[in-house]
Amino acid sequence: MATLIPTRPGRWSSHAPRDPFVSFQAEMNQLISDFFRHSDGGDLRSVITPSFDLSETDDAYQIQMDLPGVDPNDIEIEVQDNTVLICGERKCENEQEGKSFHRAERQWGRFCRSAQLPSYVDRDKVDAECRNGILTVTLPKSAESMTHRVPVKTG
């Protein structure tokens, strides 16, 4: 029986040369996946870690976080000093009356992500918007943390 190994993300082949590191990674992924499963087929994973990008302009920081399937009413944002904390919950849809799932891979549960900003922000002007499953948080820099450029005179 041929062993299937990944040749590139999303592609599996029984004809590719066997790479021991790829085989090891596949075995570790399966081990971790099995570790988080109940014996009755349920899933213990109830904490998710959404990805986010942190960018900066001259006058603000911006966080964009992937939150597909999360109700904006289930998102909490806190700013303290130069730290922003974003928490929320993606509700489990696997427990619907009259529906049985044959496969459920999407993650659900609580999440909390924090980011340390390089400087303080004006907490009163922070803005958040969720559109098409992407949360965008704009954090204007405080006046004290704005960079003041000093021109250099010649001669």
Image (cartoon, grey):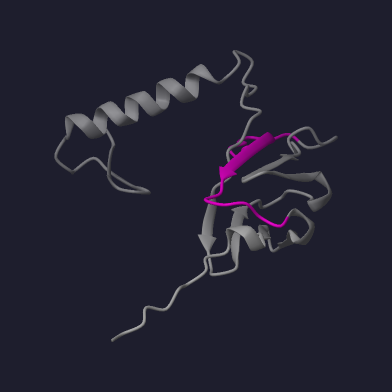
- Give the position of the C terminus as an image quadrant: bottom left
Query: In the image, is residue 107 part of the stretch drawn in magenta?
Result: yes
Taking 121 as reference, is 128 left or right? right
* Relative to 3, residue 63 above or below: below
Query: In the image, is residue 110 part of the stretch drawn in magenta?
Result: yes
Is residue 141 visible to us here?
no
Taking 47 as reference, is 57 left or right? left
The quadrant holding residue 116 is: top right
In front of the other: 106 or 55: 55
Taking 97 as reference, is 30 left or right? left
Where residue 109 sits in the image (x, y, percent)? 70, 33
Where residue 75 sits in the image (x, y, percent)? 77, 46
Residue depicted at x 76% and y 62%:
125
In front of the other: 97 or 42: 42
Q: Which residues fall within the magenta stretch?
A: 100-122
Residue depicted at x 52% and y 69%:
148
Helix, strand or loop for the magenta stretch, by majority: loop
Where residue 63 sits in the image (x, y, percent)? 60, 56
Residue depicted at x 65% and y 63%:
143
- Give the position of the N terminus as an image quadrant: top left
